[in-house]
Image (cartoon, helix red, strand yellow):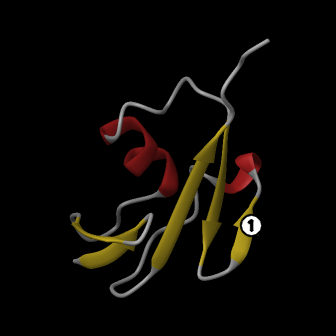
């Protein structure tokens, strides 16, 4: 299945959830915001939201600094 991840082509298996994608990208334990096709997906729905072929996914994580 082909999606766009942060503007780049990305291949994932069918039935991939946002949680699975975050885990595969090493972001499962980070505080992130996820947008699918222009809509923010709340963290409470990451485990149940399955991605579809052609989805545009943006993942943004906060960087600490001082």
Residue, disc 1: 40
Q: In the image shown, does 24 or 38 lie closer to the viewer?
A: 38
Q: Please state the horizontal and vertical placement of residue 64, each as a whole percent of the image.
A: 71, 19
Q: Residues within 10 Å of mark 1 (few under 14, many from 20)?
A: few
**Within the image, what quadrant is residue 49 found in?**
bottom right
Q: Is residue 19 left or right of residue 39?
A: left
Residue 28 against residue 12 in the figure, above or below = above
Q: Please state the horizontal and vertical placement of residue 20, each as a whole percent of the image.
A: 40, 46
Q: Residue furthest bottom?
A: 54
Q: Is residue 32 left or right of residue 24?
A: right
Q: Quadrant of the N terminus?
A: bottom left
Instruction: Tally the marks.
Output: 1
Q: Please state the horizontal and vertical placement of residue 17, each as a whole percent of the image.
A: 45, 58
Q: Which residue occupies 79% across, 12% down?
A: 66
Q: In the image shown, does 40 or 7 lie closer to the viewer?
A: 7
Q: Which residue occupies 40% across, 81% down?
A: 52
Q: Which residue occupies 33% across, 85% down?
A: 53
Q: Which residue occupies 48% across, 68% down?
A: 50
Q: Please state the horizontal and vertical placement of residue 48, each as a whole percent of the image.
A: 58, 58
Q: Residue furthest front?
A: 66
Q: In the image shown, does 66 or 14 lie closer to the viewer?
A: 66
Residue 27 against residue 38 in the figure, above or below = above
Assign a secondary structure to mark 1. Answer: strand
Q: In the image shown, does 41 or 44 lie closer to the viewer?
A: 41
């Amino acid at each position: 299945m082909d999606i766009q991840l942060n503007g780049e082509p990305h291949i994932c298996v069918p039935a991939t959830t946002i949680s699975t994608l975050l885990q595969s990208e090493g972001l499962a334990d980070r505080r992130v915001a996820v947008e699918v096709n222009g809509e923010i997906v709340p963290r409470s729905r990451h485990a149940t939201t399955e991605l579809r072929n052609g989805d545009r996914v943006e993942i943004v994580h906060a960087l600490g600094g001082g």
